[in-house]
Amino acid sequence: MTGSKNKDAYDIYYCVKNYPGGIDSLVEAFRTFPDKSIVKEGLMKIADKFASPEHFGPVAVADFNEITDMEERMIIKRDAFERVSFFLKKRRKSDNQCLSHGTVTMERIMQIFRLIKRKL
């Protein structure tokens, strides 16, 4: 299960890093999903996982890439944290709607990122 979760974190990082047109285009792509409240809730969960370079998301990115060199791990964790955080910050600024009380699973938000990754 950890391998799958590591891959999910890596997929998020990959999409944010490689989306054609950059982060602004990725933010715009998220506007096309019909249930914005579910997307916003999922992005909040991602924000929790990528809250610092030492949180689960960036660590999982380094683990997925099997990086053992400490300096290289520090660089990739910092990069994952900063890129995802920047995307999330821009996304929040682009949509000022209130979050509903609906629930979303990480599986649902990963489906969204996989759809995006397929377009890359």
Image (cartoon, grey):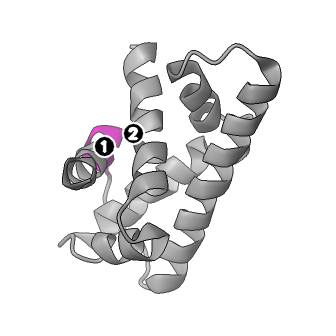
Could you classify mark 2 by the number of other residues whose Cα lies within 10 Å: few (under 14), some (14-19), or many (20 or more)? Answer: some
Taking the magenta stretch, the answer to whether it contains residue 25 is no
Q: Which residues are magenta?
A: 104-109
Q: Is residue 101 visible?
A: no
Q: Residue furthest right?
A: 71
Task: Give the number of callouts.
Answer: 2
Residue 11's tag is: 2
Residue 94 placement, left or right of 36: right
Residue at x-position 43% and y-position 45%: 14
Q: Mark 1 or mark 2: which comes first in sequence?
A: 2
Mark 1 to mark 2 CA distance (whole Å): 8 Å
Residue drawn at the location 39% of the way across and 51% of the way down: 15
What numbered label is drawn on residue 29? Answer: none
Q: Is residue 27 above or below residue 63?
A: below
Q: On the image, numbered disc 1 is attached to which residue?
A: 110
Marks 1/2 in contact by CB < 8 Å: the verdict is yes
What is the magenta segment's predominant secondary structure? helix
Tell me, yes or no, if residue 60 can be seen here: yes
Q: In the picture shown, does residue 3 fall above or below 95?
A: above
